[in-house]
Amino acid sequence: MKKIKISLFQLSIQEKSPFLNWLNTRQIILKHLIDDPGIIILPELCFYGVLSSKEELLKFYDETQKIIDEISALAKDENLTIICTIPDIKNNSQIFNTTFIFTSGDIIKAYNKINLFSPMNEDQIFEKGEEITVSPIMVNGHEITVGFLTCFDLRFPEIARQISRKGAELLIVNALWPIQRINHFTTLLRARAIENQFFAAGVNAYGRKNGYFFGGKSSVIAPDGKILILSDNKANFLTTQIDLDDINKTRQIFNTSFSNNNYGIKNKTLNIEELKKNINRRKNTGQKMVFTNGCFDILHAGHVTYLERARNFGDFFVLGLNSDESIRRLKGESRPVNNEQSRARVLEALECIDYICVFNEDTPLNLITELIPDVLVKGADWEEENIVGAKFVREHGGTVQRIAFEYDISTTRIIEKINFNKKKS
């Protein structure tokens, strides 16, 4: 049996400096060492609470570095594993809400929060994380693979599913979850465990901080949905034991965790009227639309990276795809290599794309004026004043984003290379 202890420290964040909050936390951790706490998990931003601005956070830079050093020293001296979220201040313009793993001798920056909660100004303070990660951790001679969500991330089941597919046995959720929606926290945590058939440990803060009251209810859920421990509404330190063999036992009975159904991949390509209905419905719920366009004739790494980064600017992503006729006018009779049906089908398989609309004009201006994007995206090789539709989008309250290319590659160069190799052979 692979048994591992998990300790949830549902602490109350005081109206003091981060370092004083850390000292209080350290004292309570040391008090519980006699019981072999196993993995110690703390709430989101447990030494800070809700932050009002980036400037406020930057004032804590020196304290933050000192906290990191002291947690690392404690983990090394006492052979502990401590998991918490701390601002990772890279420079004055880049700060991530980062999940740190402190083990005996190592500091691992395991995960940057992906979904930032704008009502608490997180999007004004932190950079958005982009990578779903898992980390193997050694605890008492056993290796456990752990995945991470941070507070608001819990509302996005697709991230938890990817964590499961990466082999996670334990999902850790560090949270600052208000008491008004505390039933959401407990329900969603249990749902993530049941859907993916792994253990889920959620740690929330308790008490009032900066006008918010956090609701506690930290818990550990088994792969079958059983609640192993559940905290009440106060600051406390809870410990339970999980048996990793229970994951396989649960999946042998009824396996729901590795479905390969690619829901929504087909039929993403819509005509303009169908697309507008979908867009308007989503905009009416407050979702932000991102738009870009292109030929995407021979899909390559540069395209995929560009599209993935573009998707992060909003809630859903629409791609305007040049028709075959449009490409022939722009690039000559030898293009496209792949017809529009083939190009659209390949693009439909990219998870980052929500909708595709083929347009026949030389530019996407008519499509842009019909759809009215919230965010218009093009490559950084375009000057903003030369981007088709940029002026229109700005006039309608939207923004324009330019993305630098990470790969020195293009469809034209791929074709040239193929032709060159043909000549050589």
Image (cartoon, rainbow, N blue to C red):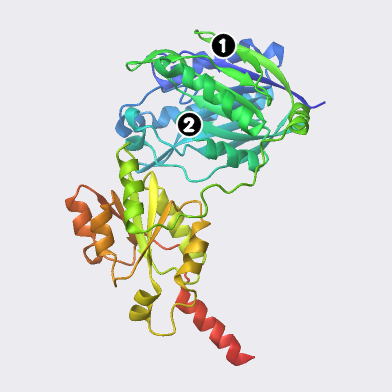
Q: Quadrant of residue 292?
A: bottom left
User: Residue 370: where, in percent of width, then height?
Assistant: 25, 56
Tag 2 residue: 155
- Front residue of 105 and 141: 141
Q: Is residue 33 above or below residue 222?
A: above
User: Residue 359: where, in percent of width, then height?
Assistant: 34, 66
Instruction: Report whether residue 409 is seen.
Output: yes
User: Residue 319: where, in percent of width, then height?
Assistant: 39, 58
Please give the name of the residue rendered at 54% of the width and 86% of the height, measured from the top-left corner.
419
In the rendered structure, which amino acid carries the disc numbered 1? Ser
In the rendered structure, which amino acid carries the disc numbered 2? Arg
Q: Tell me if mark 1 has few (under 14), some (14-19) or many (20+) residues whose alpha carbon lies within 10 angstroms of its own.
A: some
- Front residue of 313 and 156: 156
Left or right for 344, reference 109: left
Please give the name of the residue rendered at 42% of the width and 15% of the height, measured from the top-left corner.
179
Mark 2: secondary structure: helix
Q: How many marks?
A: 2
Q: Are marks 1 and 2 in contact (CB under 8 Å)?
A: no
Q: Is residue 143 above or below residue 423?
A: above
The dot on residue 231 is 1
Q: Tell me if mark 2 has few (under 14), some (14-19) or many (20+) residues whose alpha carbon lies within 10 angstroms of its own.
A: some
